[in-house]
Image (tube, helix red, strand yellow):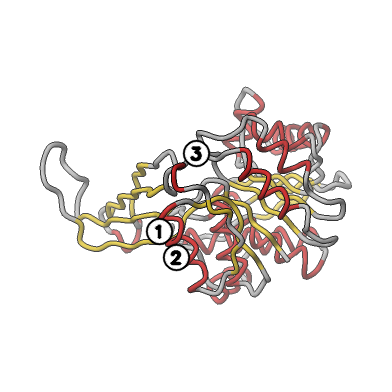
Amino acid sequence: MVYTLTLNPSLDYVMYPASFPKKGGTNRSQREEIRAGGKGINVSVVLKNLDVPTRALGFIAGNTGDEIEGTLRSIGIRTGFIMLPFKNGMSRINVKIRVPYENAEERGYEETELNAAGPVVGDDSVNDLCDRVERFADGDVMVLAGSMPTQAPENMLDRILSSVPEGVKTVVDMTGDRLKTALKYRPFLIKPNLEELCQAAGRELGSIDEIVAEAKKLQEAGAENVIVSMGPEGAILVDKNGEVHKTKAPEGKALGAFGAGDSMTAGFIKGFLDEHDYDYALKLGVAAGSAAVFVGKLPEYEEIMKVFDEV
């Protein structure tokens, strides 16, 4: 089983106006979408599309929390969210404004986001989540991805990661201090993009050798495997044996980057669980991430495998 932890999930309310809204007036959308949001949730959706058993965990609150859970269950994803007390607020609603570029069929949409803060997470709720994590079994995978609640115990991440049983592979997609905290617990995989890796290094990384050197520093700090996603250039994996794998992304029309990184994470997990081969897993990860870019949404199985043959 692959468990995903989304600690601050959302309902994403996606609006499609014909042009960017003007300040101080009434603006109208041509159509709308509502979806369950959060990086861990995105990973679960793509894993489900790839026929990988998955269960989405995290914190939800209020009516919006009920809607997040109901949306996931309606598409066949099992859940195990902790419902926060009513007084702690409600799960966030994030507004996404997607304005078409000229020649939208060729270029897709420009997306502007307004993300809410989310509810308060208390000690008892963190304990409840840790109790569920402690019941994961040998061979399971736990994906911890996305933003942290703005109002939560400072040691929440330590408490969750220290609850992971031995034999469970931990995948972490976080940045900054949260990534530094996670490295102490020797995660199976981390997945910074190139921009995030440059930020961690404090400088621009202009060559493959420099990228690999920085990835190996993250291994020295605790990560077993490091994937560096590089957009159209594909990705580099430095595996736990010190071997370097590079896969270039195929060419195609980019309709949007929504969920591309999360799709890559899901594809890599699927590939590794199926074959236990790093080259194959990286190729499937890049295929899933590229498919998300080409279709402008979280990709289906057929869309991923069509791209896989081109990677």
Numbered mark located on residue 189 in the image: none
Q: Compared to 109, does 288 lie above or below?
A: below
Query: Which residue is at a point 39% across and 41% down the rendered structure image?
Result: 116
Query: Which residue is at a point 44% across and 43% down the rendered structure image?
Result: 87
Instruction: Say whether marks 2 and 3 touch (CB < 8 Å).
Output: no
Task: Check disc 2: other Cα within 10 Å, few if <14, some if 14-19, many if 20+.
Answer: many
Residue at image mark 2: 295
Q: Position of residue 265 (x, y in %)?
A: 64, 55
SS category of the residue bearing label 3: loop
- Left or right of 11? Residue 212 is right
Disc 1 to disc 3, C-alpha distance: 35 Å
Mark 2: amino acid: Val
Residue at image mark 1: 255
Instruction: Say whether marks 1 and 3 touch (CB < 8 Å).
Output: no
In which quadrant of the rendered image does the C terminus lie? bottom right
Q: Compared to 223, does 61 lie above or below?
A: below
For marks 2 and 3, the one nearer the N-term is 3
For marks 1 and 3, the one nearer the N-term is 3
Task: Check disc 3: other Cα within 10 Å, few if <14, some if 14-19, many if 20+.
Answer: many
For marks 1 and 2, the one nearer the N-term is 1
Query: Which residue is at a point 72% across and 36% down the rendered structure image?
Result: 158
Disc 1 to disc 2, C-alpha distance: 6 Å
Query: Which residue is at a point 48% across and 58% down the rendered structure image?
Result: 293
SS category of the residue bearing label 1: loop
Which quarter of the figure has residue 206?
top right
Numbered mark located on residue 120 in the image: 3
Task: Check disc 1: other Cα within 10 Å, few if <14, some if 14-19, many if 20+.
Answer: many
Q: Position of residue 270 (x, y in %)?
A: 70, 66
Which quarter of the figure has residue 80?
bottom right
Mark 1: amino acid: Leu
